[in-house]
């Protein structure tokens, strides 16, 4: 089983719909992140959470919200989806107790298309 | 200013040849780490190699090595003996200080030609 699991893997929906992307991890990491990837723009940070009670906005949080339901679960919501939110979304985790040379661990991504 | 700059949107390399993917970074923090990730067409992010700002030697992992030039603020990835399976997007990323936020570059698409 994957250490970082994202559901769904693919989603096509219509403008105005509410969408939730879910992320769960079995790595026991305390820190979780949501990124979006657009062609030519790389990965940009949407939200991050350093523990269950600590949630922070990233560089592109407008139009998104998150919920850290437990240490292992971090969900991303689009309250009213719009076409320019069409992208590949990644969840990632890291452990604050390890050395800073440890990479983030990524899920396999969710391809979201908004028509 | 961009924290991570990858100036090569796309590159071609002949199979079995070496290739260098460029990455420059910008930070005033003396403690930072640099990462390279590979993203094949299937989409997943695969960690390749890490270089710490205080590391005395350039990092190496198999066919991957990092040409770290601290004064120039560059951390170029060198892939030796390219294989067809190396065709992918490659991202350079930086973590500053002890913070766990990581900033990514825009990526370089590498295509290996038989």
Image (cartoon, rainbow, N blue to C red):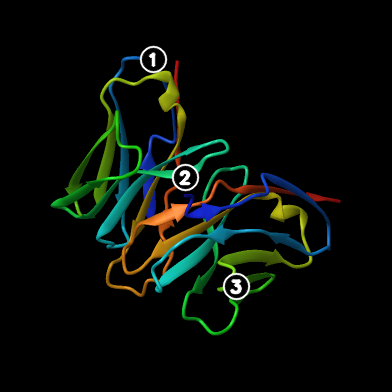
Q: Quarter of the image containing the C terminus of chain A?
A: top left
Q: As displayed, is residue A58 above or below residue A26?
A: above
Q: As displayed, is residue A64 above or below residue B86?
A: above
Circle 2 crowding by C-alpha within 10 Å: few under 14, some 14–19, many from 20: many
Q: Is residue B66 left or right of residue A30?
A: right
Distance between mark 3 and mark 2 Cα atoms: 23 Å
- Which residue does the numbered mark 2 point to in the structure image? A43
Circle 3 crowding by C-alpha within 10 Å: few under 14, some 14–19, many from 20: many
Residue appearing at x 77%, y 53% in the figure: B84
Q: Chain of mark 2?
A: A
Q: Position of residue A101 (x, y in %)?
A: 42, 72
SS for tag 3? strand
Q: Chain of mark 1?
A: A
* Tag of residue A14: 1
Q: Position of residue B73 (x, y in %)?
A: 55, 67
Residue appearing at x 48%, y 74% in the figure: B52
- Which residue does the numbered mark 3 point to in the structure image? B68
Q: Position of residue A3 (x, y in %)?
A: 38, 56
Q: Position of residue B2 (x, y in %)?
A: 49, 50
Q: Looking at the picture, tell me which residue is in the foreground, A42 or A98.
A: A42
């Amino acid at each position: 089983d994957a250490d970082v699991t994202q559901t769904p893997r693919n989603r096509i929906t219509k403008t105005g719909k509410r969408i939730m992307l879910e992320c769960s991890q079995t790595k026991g990491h305390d820190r979780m992140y949501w990124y979006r990837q657009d062609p030519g723009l790389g990965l940009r940070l949407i939200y991050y959470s350093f523990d269950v009670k600590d949630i922070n906005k990233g560089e592109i949080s407008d139009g998104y919200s998150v919920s850290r339901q437990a240490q292992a679960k971090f969900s991303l919501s689009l309250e009213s989806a719009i076409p320019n939110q069409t992208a590949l979304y990644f969840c990632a985790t890291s452990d604050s107790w390890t050395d800073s040379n440890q990479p983030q661990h990524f899920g396999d991504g969710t391809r979201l298309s908004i028509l | 200013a961009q924290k991570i700059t990858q100036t090569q949107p796309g590159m071609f390399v002949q199979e079995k040849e070496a290739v260098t993917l460029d990455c420059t970074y910008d930070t005033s923090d003396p403690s930072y780490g640099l990462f390279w990730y590979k993203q094949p067409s299937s989409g997943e992010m695969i960690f390749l190699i890490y270089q710490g700002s205080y590391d005395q030697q350039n990092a190496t992992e198999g066919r991957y090595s990092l040409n770290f030039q601290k004064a120039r603020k560059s951390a170029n990835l060198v892939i030796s003996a390219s294989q067809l399976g190396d065709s992918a997007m490659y991202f350079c990323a930086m973590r500053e200080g002890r913070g766990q936020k990581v900033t990514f570059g825009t990526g370089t698409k590498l295509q290996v030609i038989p």
